[in-house]
Structure formats: C-alpha cells, structure tokens
Image (tube, rainbow, N blue to C red):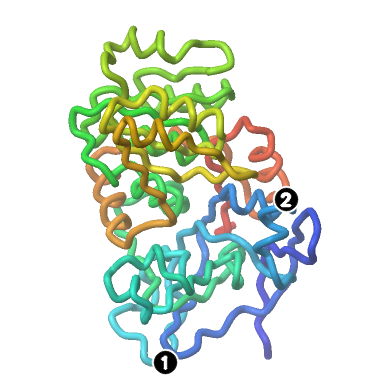
Amino acid sequence: MERLMDAIVKPERGPGLELRKVPVPVPGPGEVLIKIHKTAICGTDVHIYNWDPWAREHIKNPPMTIGHEYVGEIAELGEGVTGLTIGQRVSGEGHITCHHCRNCHTGNIQWCKNTISVGVDRDGAFAEYVCIPESNVIIIEESLPEDVVAFFDAVGNATHTALMWDLIGEDVLITGAGPIGIIAAGICKYSGARRVIITDINEDRLELARKMGVDAAVNTSKEDLPLVMKEQGLVEGFDVGLEMSGSEDAFKQMVGVMRNGGKISLLGIGNRPISIDMNQIIGKGLTLQGIYGRQMDNWHQMSYMVQGGLDLTPVITHRYNYRDFEKGFEAMNSGKSGKVILDWSK
C-alpha cells in the first residue's frame, strides 16, 4: 500500500501554496530518505509563494513540493548507500550536481552548469519526508541546535559570500539587511572584521542586524552613510563589500565608498538588470566576485563557527507548526521577520 505524507505543494502556475497528502518518496539506488524535523522559509520559497517573475521563469512543472532548508534524520537507505545509518541527524546540500562537468571535476560544484535544485526543479523538503542523493547528505552533530541547522542552507550562502575574502582587521560594508545579510554580519564579526556596517531601508531588519552585533546599522533613506563612516573612523573607505540586496542604488553606493583595491562579493539578485560604471570599477581597481550557492566546505565552516560561539538565534523571529505555514509566509512578506521556522515534529 502506498504511504502518504503531508507536504506543502505548489499546486499550479499561480500565487499560493497548498497543504496536500502526497506519496512518501521511495529512495532509489544511491539515495537517502530523510524524515523532516524542522524547515525554514527562504526568500526563494517566498518568490514561489507569490508567483513573481523569478518563480514564473524557474518553476516548470507544478504540482511540486517546495522547500530546501531543513534538518531531520535518516529514515531509509537506498540500495548501495554506505557510510550512513538510519537515525543519523542530517541536513542536505540543496544543489544536486552532475559530478562530470569541468567545475564538478575541479571541486567548484557551486558552478555546475547542470545543477538541479531541491524544491525548485524537483520535490523539496516542506514535507514529512524528502529524498536526496547520498552525496548531498550532510551529517549534523548533536551539539548543533535544530532551529539554527534548519536554515544552514542560508547560512552557507552567507558564509560563502563573507569568507570569500580575508576579513581580519578589515572594514566591511553589507548592503541589504535581509536574513542572509544579517547572518553575514555575524560571520564577519566572528571572523575578525574591524568594523561591520550594514545598510537597508527597513528599520525592523536593521534592528535585527544590531542584535547580531554590527557596529552600525544605517537606514539610507534617513541617514548619511559617509557621515557614519567618518564617525566609525573609516578614512579610505571599505575594504570588503557584501552586496545582498540586488538594488542598483545600493550597489552604486557601495562602489562609491570602497577604497582603491577593495573587494566585493555579489549575492543579491535584483528584479531587473543593474548597470555598472566600468570606469569606476577599473579606476579603483575593484575586484567583483559573483556568489552562487555554497561551497561544500562551507558546511563544515558554519558548523564549526556555531560550535565556536557564533550565535545565530537572533535571526529567528517566528516559529510555527507546518500546518500554519500561511502565517509563516505572511510574516516573511511583511518585511518584519528574520528566519521563520516550521516544525514538522508535532
């Protein structure tokens, strides 16, 4: 008899999601079935919920279970799976790569041209169970809190963006105080940055950033960033920039306040193309690095940082049972939330 489970499903091409009964996936050769404990709502999930231009472009074949940020335990092992045991606490890398392209062969799987994304291109983790390849399973130590591990996927993005550069003693500007930007601020402080300044126009998000220990949280609709820089003792400009907003205005301001020779990581994706002043980039000798997803080593780095004292709990603002997922998406859409956790254990 076919087993059924609860799942949050994109039922068709249009706004909204539904809680449905769907079949429990059966792990094939080399696959692992994970029983979900907790999940976190990502900005990608909000795009899918709202059915904005990004979702219309990327969600090809509904109905489909969404979600890719989670923690759980191994429930079943497919044929040929070794090195893992039933009952182990795990999460999973959300990008399933081909293992045979040039980037996969050189260890840069985050740039695999054949990537399949869990919860976007195939059924995801907003369900009682999810099935992923053995190679994507990440073992989670018992000392790590599940509410935080539930959004390790997002922490990995922040880790990749921030630790692209040497941060010790550096002055860092973060544009965009969404959850990943706020997490990145905490990582920068933990990793030895001298000053970390974050900008946004959302006061609720800026207040969350203050709880993560930033040196200044600047509302650029009301405050003058160069004046704040002067007050913080920044003489030549920022050494490192982390662009998390996807805003053209924010990016242009960042370029303008970088020191000559500064380095910028670009994670934020805007709703439209952003123009770049090449003369300013060249004249200042800036280095720009696009960031996509996580490097596999980021999973170890973020685990060790949390074990070493990096406190990410201020980022969590809402917790709901999965049956109340609509409240979670309302909180995310309000602009007054950090990370929203859905509990699947009750």
**Res 74 seen here:** yes
Q: Between residues 328 and 251, which one lies in front from this camera angle? A: 251
Name the residue at 41% across, 13% down. Answer: 226
**Local secondary structure at mark 1:** loop
Q: Where does residue 137 sit, x and y in percent of width and height?
A: 38, 70
Quarter of the image where one finds residue 211: top left
Q: Nearer the viewer, residue 132 or 164?
A: 164
Q: Residue at x 58, y 16 (%)?
A: 221
Q: Is residue 289 above or below residue 60?
A: above
Q: For mark 2, does the 10 Å Cα neighbourhood hold few (<14), some (14 to 19), or many (20 or more) residues? A: some
Label 2 sits on a secondary structure element that is loop
Report the quarter where the N terminus lies.
bottom right
User: Up-down: is 204 above or below 304?
Assistant: above
Residue 106: where, in percent of width, then height? 27, 71
Instruction: Name the residue type under label 2.
Output: Asp
The type of residue carrying mark 1 is: Glu
- For the image, the number of numbered tags is 2
**In the picture, which quadrant includes the C terminus?**
bottom right
Query: Label for residue 70?
Result: none
Q: CA distance from mark 1 to mark 2?
A: 39 Å
For image coordinates 43% across by 68% down, the residue present is 73
Q: On the image, which quarter does residue 17 sit in?
A: bottom right
Q: Which residue is mark 2?
A: 52
In this view, the mark in front (1 or 2): 2
Task: Please state the horizontal and vertical placement of residue 244, each as a whole percent of the image.
Answer: 48, 38
